[in-house]
């Protein structure tokens, strides 16, 4: 699974309002525009969202389970 394709999908929706509308209301029309796996396509079609924020949140829960928080490293030898 290429997470880059999913990130590209959301990124394109951020900058292209027509694409965003189609993604939220007619997702089957945008599936051919990116190189998504069958699993990713199925996930996109299963998402029901009223906003890009909701869509991205649901997509994140399906594919980006890990959460990386930035924390400063502590020097152990000091």
Image (cartoon, rainbow, N blue to C red):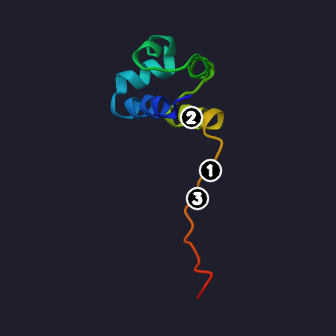
The N terminus lies in which quarter of the figure? top right
Q: Residue at x 50, y 21 (%)?
A: 36
> Cα distance, mark 1 to mark 2?
18 Å
In screen coordinates, is 31 left or right of 67?
left
Say whether residue 73 is left or right of residue 5: right
Q: Residue at x 54, y 28 (%)?
A: 50
Q: In what element is the residue under mark 3? A: loop
17 on left or right of 28: left
Q: CA distance from mark 3 to mark 1?
A: 6 Å
Residues packed near mark 2 inside 10 Å, few (<14), some (14 to 19) or many (20 plus): some
* Farthest-out residue, bottom: 78
**Which of the pair 71/44 is nearer the observer?**
71
Q: Mark 1: which secondary structure?
A: loop
10 Å crowding of disc 1: few (<14), some (14-19), many (20+): few
Q: What residue is pinned by disc 1?
A: 67
Tell me the distance, in whole angstroms, between the alpha carbons under discs 3 and 2: 21 Å
- Picture residue at 42% right of the left edge, 31% below the top: 8
Percent across and percent down for residue 69 are 58, 58
Front one among 18 and 34:
34
Identify which residue is drawn at 44% across, 28% down.
9
Q: Which residue is mark 3?
A: 69
Lower position in the chain sequence, tag 3 or tag 2 = 2
| Residue 55, x across and y down, in percent | 55, 31
The correct choice, above or below, for 28 with respect to 65 in the image is: above
């Amino acid at each position: 699974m290429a997470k880059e394709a999913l990130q590209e999908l959301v990124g394109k929706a951020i900058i292209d309002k027509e694409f965003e509308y189609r993604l939220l209301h007619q997702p089957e029309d945008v599936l051919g525009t990116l190189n998504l796996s069958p699993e990713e396509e199925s996930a996109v079609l299963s998402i029901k969202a009223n906003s890009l924020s909701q869509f991205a949140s649901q997509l994140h829960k399906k594919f980006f389970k890990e959460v990386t928080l930035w924390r400063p490293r502590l020097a152990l030898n000091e």
